[in-house]
Amino acid sequence: MRILLVTNLLPPDYEGGYELNAWKLAVALRERGHNVQVVTSKYRKKHRGERPDFDWVHRILEFRPYQDPLLGKLGRYWAFAWWQAVELRNVPAMQKYLAPEQFDVAYVFGVHDVGMGILNLIQDRGIPILWHLGDYIYPEQRKRFDDSKFKQILASTVLKGVKARAAALRLENAAFISKYLQEEFEARGEKAGKSYVIPRGIEFELHRDVDRLRIAPPAFTVAGRLVPDKGFHVAIQAARDLLKRRPDLNWQLQLVGSGNPIYEESLKKTIAVDPELQRRVHFLGRKTRAQVVEIFKASTAFISASTWEEPFGNTNIEAMAAGTPIIASKSGGILEIVENERTALVYPKESWEQLSLAMERILTEEGLSRKLALNALKDVEERFAFSKIFDRTEAVLREVAGHPVGEKKAA
């Protein structure tokens, strides 16, 4: 098959789980003989390092993150104008690229901050689109265009083009990363013609030696973007509670990630009032995916402390594959990954009290960590091995493109 993969960001410019997944699938599809061409955004100024792109990676789009000027309702007008400016740049670039090309199917990962209008060009050429949906951005952007007041006000303005293009897009084929996200889309009135659930997968070797030596003192690790949604503050509060309740236990808390500097500063101020807590809590900063896995391997447990409804939670399957026990908040798609008391300890979202008790159990309950880690390894091998996820992805792409499995067709 000839496959057009569209993603707003792509490594090495940005290495989030979403973008890494797009890259892994593009490489795997090419290795299996498919002609994959990737359209993505140009390198941003803040990118540092080499830019070793293949000739099948086309960096033609302008990436312009939306900046909310905090204008209240007026801010929605600003949002429309912002997206129009983005599309005025990217639609012609995409049109020029597509003119001489032929594709069997388009696999779309993300278009926020590059403009949804580029997808109309693909749809208008009759190329079937498979949406890879791993967040809530698609329905949130569509909802902005469905406000009846704005429809009346903007009907005769330049923004009419933006609304018309968004309204014309059809969600005919969608691959959701969790059943939870699929149901959430339907609840928001965005039901796809055909929908599939394809979670993310683990491509590195499983670390089965759960009895290995780990760092001392025992370390609990929280990893992710350093933003409130990831619940770093909940983990710190749980650590403070554990320290107060069981001062005899020796442990440390590692916070891995970067993001919101104001939030990070507030966390540091929280622990600064208690010298003993400050001694135990360590900010490790941003790490590569490979480094994060190594930290997981050395940790006593991984804490998935999300305070929002996670569509999936990639760090959970990474910790499972690393042979490290998980303590997870009861949040969205995470409950499709872990099972309470069998592969993880699950606590009510935002309950630092229950998180603190789970941390104590990991430190004191004999055999618990080993049981959780072994069961999790079995699950991740059976359900989240990248080879299985990739087979599923390829089969869905063939179905959307109208190429039955096993059909001999030139790539």
Image: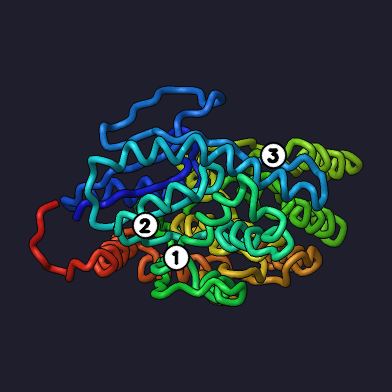
Which mark sits nearer the N-terminus, 1 or 2? 2
Which mark sits nearer the N-terminus, 1 or 3? 3
Numbered tag placed on residue 123 in the rendering: 2
Numbered tag placed on residue 67 in the rendering: 3
Give the labeled residue for mark 1: 170
Quadrant the N terminus occupies: bottom left
The amino acid type, in three-letter code, at marker 2 is: Gln
Q: How is the image coloured?
A: rainbow
Count of number-bearing discs = 3
Where residue 42 sits, quadrant-wise, is: top left
x, y percent for residue 125 = 30, 54
Element carrying mark 3: loop
Estimate the spatial distance between the alpha carbons at disc 3 and disc 2, rounded to whole Å: 28 Å
The foreground one among 180 and 408 is 408
Which residue sits at x=32%, y=61%?
128
Q: Is residue 279 visible?
A: no
Element carrying mark 2: helix
